[in-house]
Image (cartoon, rainbow, N blue to C red):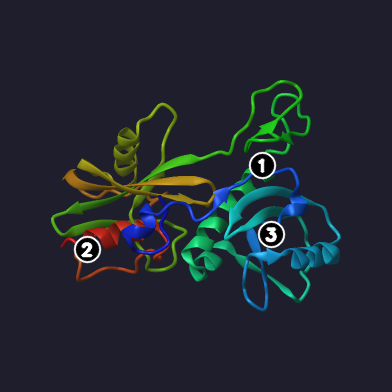
Amino acid sequence: MRLYDSTMKVLLDPLPFTPYVSSNLLEHTKHVVFINGQVVCWAASQSPLLTSSQWQMLQSALNTESLSFSLAQFQQQQVAGHVLSIDCDLPKAFVLLPLRAVLLSLPSATAELLNYAMQLADWHDLHRYCGRCSQPLTDHPTERAKVCRCGARSRYPTISPCVIVLITRGTQMLLARAPHYPEGRYSTIAGFLEPGESVEQGLKREVKEEVGVDVCNLQYKASQPWPFPNSLMLGFHADHAAGEILIDNHEIIAADWFDPENLPQLPPPISIARWLIDDFLSSC
């Protein structure tokens, strides 16, 4: 399930692309290019999906090697991903944009593809060498995996499960601010699971650590892949059970109960945090 607008239809729709593995990158007709966690777009259209001629133009101008990989079949075309490491300006025909800003501007299908591409680009970039023998890893010929001739086990793309929960008390919502949020923005509580921890245990622990309250009546709502860097957000609604708000002043710097008619600045519509809030408000 994915979320790029506030409708359940998008959550339940199948993937708009087919993951695709091929060693023949010459057959790919569309290209997604990342530099230092940002995405290269064609300046005239602001599109992150470059044609083969645009990709060749970029390669020729920069004269640098790329970490390239097969990505997906999308709208009857084969798409490749590329990671570049450069410290020079792009040609004027291209522009380098933050991924979050680009995701907000795209149709949902293209945004989902870009989400997928960013997670794979990050995985390829961080798994160049074997952790056992330090030799370069190679791509498995038929699977999305990295292998080493030393016989170490195959490495598959990393997915980090993360719980995210809207806590309510009657019609009030408990929303919190993290230090990196834009001024005035509040959101739901979220955190990564620990090894050996169930989703329910992790949710209750994160809530207790970050805002000091206990919760009950956990209800799973939806999930969303989130490429910052490789999370799978597992969305829940929970009722307040006991306790007063007590923030940790580290991960959370402010938290409060909010009525539906007196809400702070909320997360952007592309996030599951916003969907959890909108879903609850629709039932009030």
Taking the spot 43% from the left edge, 61% from the top edge, the residue there is 4
Q: Quadrant of residue 147?
A: top right
Residue indicated by mark 1 = 126
Above or below, 74 relative to 107: above
Image depth: mark 3 or mark 1 in front: 3
Side (left or right) of 210 relative to 245: right
Q: Earlier in the sequence, mark 2 or mark 1?
A: 1
CB atoms of marks 2 and 1 within 8 Å = no
Residue at the extreme front of the image, as rendered:
76
Residue indicated by mark 2 = 281
| Amino acid type, residue under disc 2 in the picture | Leu
| Amino acid type, residue under disc 1 in the picture | Leu
Q: Residues within 10 Å of mark 3 (few under 14, many from 20)?
A: many
Q: Which mark is residue 104?
A: none
- SS assignment at label 3: strand
Above or below, 272 relative to 157: below
Can residue 177 be seen in the rendering of this structure? no
CB atoms of marks 3 and 1 within 8 Å = no
Which of the image's four quarters has the C terminus? bottom left
Residue indicated by mark 3 = 31
* Residue 110, percent from left and from top: 54, 62
